[in-house]
Image (spheres, grey):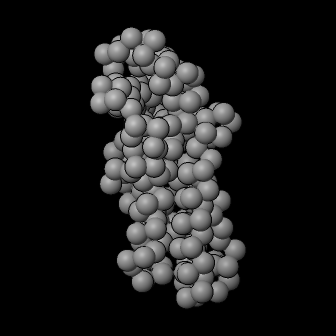
Amino acid sequence: MATRDALEPAVASMRADARRNRERILVAARETFAEHGADAQMDEIARRAGVGVGTLYRHFPTKDELVGELIRIKLTDFAVRARVKFEEDDRPWESFAELLREQAEIAARDASQQRMIFAMTHEALEQALPTITELTAAMQALIDRAKAAGKVREDVVVDDVRTLMCGLGSIMAANALGVMPYDWRRHLEFVLAGMRVGCPDSGA
């Protein structure tokens, strides 16, 4: 579900060759961050994209801006799917849990998402803040509906989802590096069980 150009009028108004260069840069950035995490270098991204360093910096004047755009794209997609779940799926618990499972599977297939957390800075997050706000609202709507239906514990908050997804990404990255064979799917199901009303330890 491609949404980034629709949400960025400045990008849509670019010449076709400039948009192609920008897309090549983003693809190359994902590949480079997937391999090197926070150590990814801008000149390496430019080389992989087949553009000059000057072209790269015209699109993204700093590494933080490039990281912020990658975060924005990822979270925009997450927010869109959260809204679709809310609008098209009237099963309060299932729509919430399935969204988190789907997002985790997407991250498991994308090493750049797993390792992006290590390249985040306050400046990068500031750039992605409008999208973070959109995702927070979409996720809050799902949580509130599940609470109203008596399916999710009253003390569950959106930050619990953020903590879970960041933790899963770190586990996936560790697995990819061969550090430790953690089972992130098992961990995800334990956390989901703890969020759901009716879990033995939920007090319900």
Question: Residue 81's image quarter?
Answer: bottom left
Is the N terminus in the top left, top right, bottom left or bottom right quadrant?
Answer: bottom left
- Does residue 47 lie above or below 109 as drawn? above
- Taking depth in this image into account, of 170 and 93 the one nearest to the observer is 93
Seen at 53% across and 32% down, the residue is 67
Residue 105 is at least partly visible in this image? yes
- Taking depth in this image into account, of 104 and 87 the one nearest to the observer is 87
Question: Residue 140's image quarter?
Answer: bottom right
- Does residue 28 lie above or below 204 as drawn? above
Seen at 45% across and 56% down, the residue is 78
Taking the image as shown, residue 77 lies to the left or right of residue 145, namely left
- Taking depth in this image into account, of 166 and 31 the one nearest to the observer is 31
Taking the image as shown, residue 113 lies to the left or right of residue 136, namely left
Seen at 55% across and 81% down, the residue is 145
The spot of residue 63 in percent (x, y) is: 55, 24
The spot of residue 66 in percent (x, y) is: 51, 29
The spot of residue 143 in percent (x, y) is: 57, 74
Is the C terminus in the top left, top right, bottom left or bottom right quadrant?
Answer: bottom right
Residue 183 is at least partly visible in this image? no
Question: Residue 33's image quarter?
Answer: top left
The spot of residue 27 in percent (x, y) is: 35, 31
Seen at 40% across and 69% down, the residue is 84
- Taking depth in this image into account, of 49 and 161 the one nearest to the observer is 49
